[in-house]
Structure formats: structure tokens, C-alpha cells
């Protein structure tokens, strides 16, 4: 399973969260603490919002811990909202089009988890993507298919409903195909203004997810890297051992990070 983080708040350099903390995302690429697999070496990606409406994107297939370009880029890019992701493939090939985040217009999406029996229902799901998004599909992951299904189901107008409709659609396809394996996910989605985070599973084992507000990440020497005040951070696992600032997200809950705070609500499927 993958590891990821999403940040929204006062502008800061990406290395403050992706490179420098005690349990940074780069560290998690080779030694994740709460993942099914400790190694997340099947590529990485960062997406960030700058002065243009559409976000920047940098992805590659190398292990994050072994890519000097990633460190150099993170030292120079400053953003008010950004995503970071390190990938552990659940079956799809290791190439750039399969690395997260995925981008469409002003939207970013990244994911950790798996659609059970995806190989058995992939054709049905892909054919359910709206024509205006079908040609945008570049890779072979269940994550990218989920993103374009959500866009097809009205993500731009109502993210919460689109997520609920999309998951219900996938679960129905799994049931019809006789798939017994579970559906599990955490995901982050942004339009450049708000970040939506979701922790959901069809069984009782959703992937880990945490959030913090007023983030004060620490580096490897225990020094505070930055006190961001009103910043919000959503992560697969805590970036340091400051337990008091990290809140574990309950299963089947949706988070919305906006206006310097995070709200959480129970997540219910459509229909």
C-alpha cells in the first residue's frame, strides 16, 4: 500500500514536510510504519498549486529515497497547497502514468488502497467513464479509474456525493462479479481551494489516516521545522512522534480541510 500527505495553509517549501521530518514521506518510501508493506518504491509524485489555476505535477518511477531531483525540486518549490505520494504497486505496472497524483484541469487526486478483483471488473468500470474523460485515461491503475469515475459522477459540482456514488458503483460491480476481496481506500482530492480526504473500506480494515491543524513538524534532530499556525495536514501516518498533534481519522469518515481548519463527518454511500 502507498503513503501520502496533503497540505493546505500558509505557503511553505515542500521539503519541510516531504523531506525533513523524522518520519518524512521519503523515509516512509523505504520504512513505512503503518502500511501493509514497509517499502513503497514503485514511484513517487508531487502536485502543487502555484500562481496558475492548474496545479504543477512531477512524477517518476524511481524510489523516492533514491531520487536527487525530487529533493532538489522540493527545496525550491513553495506552495500553499500540495500533495505528496510514494507508491507501492498492487499489480499495475511501474511507469510514470501510474504514479500519483493524477491531474485533470484544476483537480488533483491521490489514493492508497485497492479495488478488490479489479482485473475482473476493470472493463465495466472503464466503460462507465463519461466520454469527455475517457480519452484522459493514461495508465492502468484502479486509482486513476476511480478518479475519472468520480469526475464522471459530478466531482466538480459535489465531491462528497460523487465519492459516495462512485464507491457504490464499484461495490455493485464487485458484487455482480462475485468478488470477495475487500474495497479499501484512503484518498485526497483538491480543486486548489479545499482538500477532501476519505478513509473507507468495505470491511473493518481501512488503511491508516491522520490529520493535524497548526502543524509543527520536527526534523531528525527534534527541532521544529515550521509553525504554520492555521495549516492543515492529512497524512497516511504521522511525520513525527508528537502524538498530541495527530488525530486518527475514524473509519468511514470524510474530511474537508478549508479556511484553516478541518471538519470530519461520517461518510455514507449513495443509495
Image: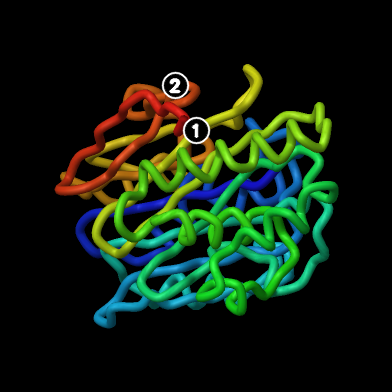
- For label 2, the residue is 250
Labelled pair 2, 1 in contact (Cβ < 8 Å): yes
Q: How many marks?
A: 2
239 or 196: which is nearer to us? 196
Q: In this view of the protein, which residue sits in the foreground, 34 or 143?
A: 143
10 Å crowding of disc 1: few (<14), some (14-19), many (20+): many
Whether residue 223 can be seen here? no
Q: Element type at marker 2?
A: loop
Cα–Cα span, label 2 and label 1: 7 Å
User: Eyeballing the image, is 8 above or below 230?
Assistant: below
Using the image, determine if residue 247 lies above or below residue 39.
above
The image shows residue 105 at horizontal and vertical percentages of 40, 75
Q: Is residue 46 left or right of residue 230?
A: right
Residue 199, which numbered label? 1
- Up/down of 201 relative to 215, above or below: above
* Residue visible at 67% across and 34% down in the picture: 183
Mark 2 neighbour density, 10 Å: few (under 14) some (14–19) many (20 or more): some
Q: Is residue 6 visible?
A: yes
From the viewer's perspective, tell me whether residue 216 is left or right of residue 184.
left
Sequence-wise, the earlier of marks 2 and 1 is 1
Q: Relative to the observer, which residue lies in front, 73 or 199?
A: 199
**Picture quarter with the N terminus:** top right
Quadrant housing residue 212? top left
Q: Secondary structure at mark 1?
A: strand
Q: Residue at x 33, y 71 (%)?
A: 49
Amino acid at each position: 500500500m502507498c503513503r501520502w500527505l496533503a497540505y493546505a495553509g500558509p505557503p511553505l517549501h515542500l521539503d519541510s514536510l516531504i523531506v525533513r521530518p523524522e518520519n518524512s514521506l521519503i523515509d516512509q518510501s523505504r520504512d513505512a510504519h503503518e502500511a501493509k508493506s514497509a517499502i513503497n518504491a514503485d514511484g513517487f509524485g508531487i502536485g502543487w498549486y502555484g500562481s496558475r489555476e492548474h496545479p504543477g505535477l512531477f512524477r517518476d518511477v524511481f524510489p523516492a529515497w533514491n531520487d536527487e531531483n525530487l529533493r532538489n525540486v522540493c527545496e525550491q518549490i513553495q506552495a500553499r497547497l500540495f500533495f505528496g505520494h510514494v507508491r507501492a504497486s498492487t499489480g499495475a505496472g511501474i511507469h510514470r502514468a501510474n504514479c500519483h497524483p493524477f491531474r485533470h484541469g484544476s483537480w488533483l487526486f491521490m489514493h492508497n488502497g485497492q479495488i478488490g478483483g479489479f482485473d475482473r471488473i476493470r472493463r465495466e468500470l472503464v466503460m462507465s467513464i463519461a466520454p469527455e474523460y475517457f480519452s484522459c485515461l493514461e495508465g492502468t491503475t484502479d486509482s486513476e479509474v476511480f478518479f475519472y469515475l468520480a469526475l464522471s459522477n459530478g466531482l466538480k459540482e459535489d465531491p462528497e456525493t460523487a465519492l459516495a456514488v462512485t464507491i457504490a458503483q464499484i461495490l455493485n460491480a464487485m458484487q455482480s462479479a462475485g468478488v470477495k476481496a475487500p474495497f479499501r481506500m484512503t484518498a485526497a482530492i483538491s480543486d486548489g481551494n479545499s482538500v477532501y480526504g476519505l478513509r473507507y473500506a468495505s470491511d473493518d480494515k481501512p488503511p491508516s489516516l491522520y490529520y493535524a491543524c497548526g502543524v509543527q513538524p520536527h526534523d531528525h534532530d527534534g527541532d521544529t521545522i515550521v509553525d504554520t499556525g492555521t495549516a492543515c495536514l492529512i497524512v497516511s501516518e504521522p511525520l513525527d512522534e508528537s502524538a498530541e498533534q495527530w488525530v486518527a481519522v475514524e473509519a468511514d469518515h470524510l474530511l474537508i480541510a478549508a479556511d484553516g481548519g478541518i471538519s470530519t463527518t461520517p461518510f455514507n454511500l449513495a443509495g
